[in-house]
Amino acid sequence: MYNNILLLFNIGGAELFFIVLVVIMFFGSKKIPELARSLGKGMKELKNATNDIQQEIKDSTKDISKLKDSVDVEKQVKSMIMDTKVEKKNEELATEIEEEIQPSQPNTVSRTSSYSTTSSTNKDS
């Protein structure tokens, strides 16, 4: 099987001349340049399409790399940690200020309770 494939590509000058002669007879001498032109145009369009696709891929990877460079994850994490520390400090300061502002309750007995006690003792006597 491999020998048949190798023999197929072992084409000499006479065989090549015979193939060209058959192609000219089949298509005619006027159609061969048209076929070659259309084949060339098709190959050119295919090459342009592949170049366009490659260029789009390169542009998109540039955009992604720019985005990646602009996003600094380490910096964002550090800023988030600092923000939480600042919030905790602010809460602690707020509670300290509230404690300082609130007056302490006096340790005295209110007047209403003392009057009621004395009036009830006066009534009993």
Image (cartoon, grey):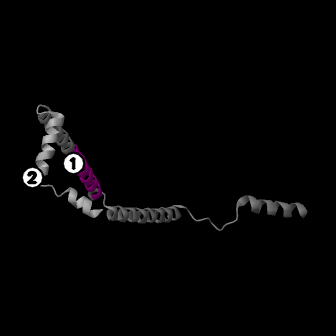
Please state the horizontal and vertical placement of residue 114, each as a whole percent of the image. 75, 63
Q: Which is in the foreground here, disc 1 or disc 2?
A: 2
Q: What residue appears at the point 58 percent right and 65 percent down from the top-left corner?
A: 104
> Which residue matches tag 1?
55
Front residue of this view, candidates 7 and 36: 7
Quadrant containing the N terminus is bottom left
User: Which residue is the extreme one toward the top?
Assistant: 30
Residue 46's x, y, as percent? 21, 43
In this orientation, which residue lies closer to the viewer: 57 or 47?
47
Question: Image height check: is 62 above or below 92?
Answer: above
Residue 48 at x, y percent in the picture: 19, 43
Name which residue type carries label 2.
Answer: Gly
- Please state which amino acid type lies under the numbered disc 1: Gln
Q: Quadrant of residue 79?
A: bottom left
First to last magenta residue range: 49-68
Q: Is residue 51 magenta?
A: yes
Q: Nearer the viewer, residue 65 or 98?
A: 65
Q: Which residue is mark 2?
A: 13
Residue at point 43% right, 65% down?
89
Q: How many marks?
A: 2
Mark found first going from the N terminus, 1 or 2: 2
